[in-house]
Image (cartoon, rainbow, N blue to C red):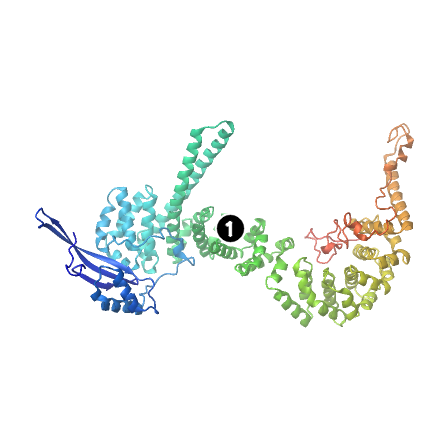
Amino acid sequence: ICTYDERSYFPQKCCLDVHPTEKALVVHYEVEASILGEAGNARHEEKKECQKIIRLRSLNASTDVSALARKVVEECKIIHPSKLAEVEHLLLYLQNRKKPSMEKKEKKPSKPRELLPFEGMEIDEEANINKTDDYIELLYESMPEKIRGSTLILHLARNPDNLEELLHNKTLLGALTRVLREDWKHSVELATTIIYVFFCFSSFSQFHGLITHYKIGLLCMNIIEHELKKYDLWQDELEKKSKAYILFINLFSIKKLIKEYEKTLKKYQSFLVKQEQLLRVAFYLLLNLSEDTRTELKMRNKNIVHLLVKSLERENQELLVLVVSFLKKLSIFLENKNDMAEMDTVEKLARLVPCEQEDLMNVTLRLLLNLSFDTGLRTKMVHVGLLPKLTALLGDDTYKHIAMRILYHISVDDKSKSMFAYTDCIPQLCICSAGNGLKMLMKRALKLKEPLMMKMIRNISQHDGPLKQLFIEYVGDLAAQIKQEGGEEFVIECLGTMANLTIPDLDWELLLKEYNLVPYLKDHLKPGSAEDDLILEVVIMIGTVSMDDSCAVMLAKSGIIPALIELLNAQQEDDEFVCQIIYVFYQMVFHQATRDVIIKDTQAPAYLIDLMHDKNVEIRQVCDNTLDIIAEYDEEWGKKIQSEKFRWHNSQWLEMVESRQMEDTEPYMYGDDPDALEQPDLFYSTDGMMAPEPGLSPDFYSQSYSQNGDFNACNGADGRPATAYGFRPDEPFFHGYGSTR
C-alpha cells in the first residue's frame, strides 16, 4: 500500500535530476508499503526508493521549453504541479548541455551499429552499476544463471559511462574471461553475450591493452574456427538427410523420415541464426583490435584470412558486410593479399556482384579494387565472369567510378584486352557521361591532330547501338579534316571513323555535296595516288555512303564505278581490297540506277564471275550474293552465271572421277544405268535464277540475304566484310585477309 500525501495524492518525497548522458529527466521518489492488521493499524512498514526516467527525444534547440515542461508535469503523475518551474529549469539545462565526448575509435564499416546483434536491446533499468558484484556471483552458478548474470553485465557495459567503473572492478573481467574460456562450447548465447561485453570495451582504443592482456582476441579466433567446423558438420548432416529424403520419397512415403528431416532442418536454421550472431560480434571485436598493426600481424599468423574467406559462403548480409570490410582492411598488406589469392577469394566475391544490399555491394567492389593490383587476381576476375558484371555497373551512378577503376586495371594486361571486345564497356564509358567523354576526346583530337587519339575514337565508332548517334554532330568536323592538308595517318582515322557510321539518320548526300567530297573520293581511287591504307579507307567509305540511294546515284554518275574496276585490276592480289570493292558493287546493285550502270555499262559482272570461286571464303560469299541479285534482274547475265556455276560444278565432279582412276571392270558409280548422270538433281541449283516477277524489289532478298551487306557469314561490324584494321596475330577472333591466290 503506497502512502501519499492526503491533500495532493503525490509521493511524499520526489526530487528531480537530469540524466548524465541522455536527454532525459530522472525522477527519484519514495514508495512506502504497509501491512495492516485487522484493526487497521500498520503491523509492518517498508520504504523503497525508486526512480523513473522520462526520455525527451524531441528536445532540440528550437523546442519551446515552457510548453514541454507543462506537458511533462501533466503526463507524469509523480511530479507535483508546484515543481513546474524546476522542471522548466532542468529542461533548459538539457537543451543547452553539450554532449560529453569520449575518444572513440573509428568503427568499420560505415554503419557499425547496424551490424551488431541485440540492436533492439534497451538499457535495462533493473541493471544497476552498484550491483555488479551480485551479477558476478551469478557467473558461478548454473548455466541459466550465468547467462542472466552476463546479460545484466552487458546491459551495464552498453552504456559508455559505466565502462570506467566496470574496469575498476578487479574481479569482473577475470571472471568473464574464465567463464568464456570454460563454458563457450556449452552455450552459444553465453559466448555471444560475454564477447559482446568485451566488444563494448574494444570500441575505445584505450581499452585494447586490457583485452589483449586477457587474450580475448585469441580466444575469439578459436571460437570462430570451432563454429565454422561445426557449420560444415551441420551442412554434411543436412545433405545426407536430404539425399535420404529424396531417395525414399521417390520410392514410397515414409512419414517418420520426412518428419526427421524437417526437424533437423528446423534445428539447423535455429543454430544458424545463433551462430551468425556469435560470428558477427567476434569478428567485430577482432576488427577493432586490428587497429594495432602488431595485433593484426598476430591474427594473420593465426590464419585470420582463412576464417574470413570461409565465412564468405554465408548468406547473412550483415555478416558479409563485416567480413568483406575486414578483408578489405587486411588486403593492403602483401602477405594477406597472397593468403586471399590462395583461398580463391575472387571466386567467392564474384557471386556478390551484383547484390541488392548497397553497403555490401560497395565494400565488395572496393575489396576487388585492392585485389586488382595483382596480375594473377586480375586474370581470375576475367575467368570467373566479372568483366561483363563490372561493365554493367558503368550505367549505375552509385558504382560506376569504382567499377571503372577495376576495369582499367584489368585492361592493363594484354591478354585481357581482347575480352573487352565481347562487352559493351567502351560504349558504356562514353554513354555513362551522356556523351561528355566523347566530346572531350573529339575536341582534343581535332585540335591537336593526334592520330592515336583519333584511332581510339574510331574504335569507339565501331560499336553498334545508341553510341553511334552521338557521332552525328561531329560528322561535319570529320569531313572538314579529310580535305585539309595534314598528316595522312590522321586523315585515315577520320575516314575510318566516318565509314563506321552506318546510321539511317545521317544525310550522306547533303554531307558529300556540302564538303565536295565526291571528287576527293574519286581521285584517291587511282592506284599510286596515295598510300594503300588511305585508298582502302576511301573504298570502305564509298561502301558506307552507297547504302543511301541518292548517294549511290551521285557516285555512279561521277564515274566512280570504272575507277573501282581499275583499282580492282591493280590490287587483285590483295584480298582485302578485292573484298571491299566487291562489297561496294553489292551495295550498288540494290539501287535501280546504279544497278543498270554496273550491269550494262561496265564489266563488273564479268569480274565477279571470275571471283566467285576464289579461295577466300568471304570474297566468295560477297560475290555469290551480288551475282544472285544481278541474275535476278538481267536474263542474259543470269544465263552466263548459271552456265559458269554448272561448268565449275561439272569440272569438280570430273576431277573427282579422274582422281579415283576407275578400272574398266569397276561398275558405274551411279549403278548400271549410264543415263543416270542426266538426272536433273545433279545439276547446280538454280534457285533465284528465274526471270524477275513484275514489281520485284531488293526487299525480296531480305528473307535469304540480309540487305545492305548484312551477311550471316561476314565477321565485320555493320555487316560489311571484316578488314585488317586492328588485326593482331594473337587475337584470333579478328578475321584477317592475306593473299590466297
Residue 274 image-quadrant placement: top left
Instruction: Give the camera-side residue of 410 and 298.
Output: 410
Q: Position of residue 279 (x, y in %)?
A: 39, 48
x, y percentage for residue 699?
Answer: 79, 52
Mark 1 element type: loop
Image position of 103 (left or right of 455):
left
Using the rendered view, name the quadrant where residue 464 is placed: bottom right
Could you say where residue 372 lies in the image, as x and y percent from the top left?
54, 56
**Residue under numbered circle 1:** 352
**Amino acid type, mark 1:** Leu
> Where does residue 562 sit, x and y in percent of width and height?
87, 61
- Left or right: 505 in relation to 159: right
Residue 105 appears in the figure = yes
Q: Decide: is 464 above or below 191.
A: below
The residue at 87%/53% (across/down) is: 605
Above or below, 201 against 658 in this view is below
> Would residue 156 appear left or right of 427 to someone viewing this image?
left
